[in-house]
Amino acid sequence: MPQITGNLLAISDLHVGYEENRKIVAGLRPETDEDWLLVAGDVGEMSEDIAWALATLASRFAKVLWVPGNHELWTPPKDPLRLRGVERYAHLVELCRSLGIVTPEDPYPVWQGPRGPVTVAPLFLLYDYTFRTDAALSREEALAAAHEAGVVCTDEYLLHPDPYDSRQAWCEARVRLTEERLGALDPTMPLVLVNHYPLVRTPMDVLRYPEFALWCGTERTADWHRRFPVAAMVYGHLHIPRSTVYDGVPFEEVSVGYPREWQRPGHPRTVPPRRIRPVVPAVRGER
């Protein structure tokens, strides 16, 4: 297959329900006609906003890959789309497929550009409350402590796991399925993993409210960047854009975040999107 000359770009947490963020998406343009864009979740909350943003991006980039954030999976009271849980996710997958966007349910494409080839794997894993401030606490105790501290993710009210009994059960099913898919890949082919949440807990060490880590991933993926041939891991969710390295693997947090965050003086926001290939930004925070 001939090598392409474009870039592998990434962005997340567009939150286009905010007018300022909608303008960012409206102004996004590829650097070349062959650029791919990795969208690591939280495009928006309302179904119409999500559809607009994804259609806009699909019309501009050579290939778009999307993974769901927690916000896409919400069922907001004012959203005319009343689907919940797995049915809502399935609806979003079909929307993406109608636009030519690659989802976690599709075959993983191979990037043939500079510093390739790499297999790009969009993942949907959710979280299971195992990122706790105190490992001695049970899930129930950790959630109670978070409620007492006033740190409660809106997912508890709007992200329904139907037909699963709980979000952690949905997470377990997604982790098991994804682990099998990754294990079946060519072990000699480098991977770029894209997930809304980081694979490891360490990025949560910089959270202002450490209790929020409960809604940020699962310990079940803690060794994936070592077990599999991961060349880079792309994520969002934390609204703390930065580049770090864990066990020699670059982790790229590529979120835009809310206007009140990225408009704040000193916010470490770079002009989106982030280039993952061919140039990886300088990294900080080696573990």
Image (cartoon, rainbow, N blue to C red):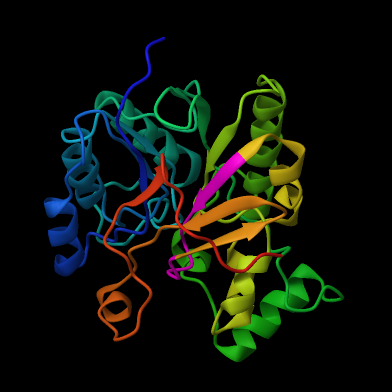
- Look at the image and tell me in which quarter the N terminus lies: top left
Task: Please tell me how many numbered marks the rendered image carries.
Answer: 0
Q: Is residue 280 left or right of residue 95?
A: right
Q: Is residue 245 left or right of residue 235?
A: right
Residue 137 locus on image (x, y percent): 82, 76
Q: Which segment is the magenta one?
A: 231-241
Q: Say if 193 sits above or below 210 in the image.
A: above
For the residue pair 47 and 11, the one nearer the viewer reads as 11
Q: Say if 122 sits above or below 286 in the image.
A: above
Q: Residue furthest top?
A: 1
Q: Say if 201 sits above or below 145 in the image.
A: above
Q: Residue furthest bottom?
A: 149
Q: Is residue 166 visible?
A: no
- Look at the image and tell me in which quarter the C terminus lies: bottom right
Residue 10 locus on image (x, y percent): 37, 47
- Residue 66 shown in magenta: no
Q: Which residue occupies 30% across, 72% down?
A: 258
Q: Quadrant of residue 193?
A: top right
Q: Which residue occupies 67% across, 41% down?
A: 175
Residue 271 locus on image (x, y percent): 26, 62
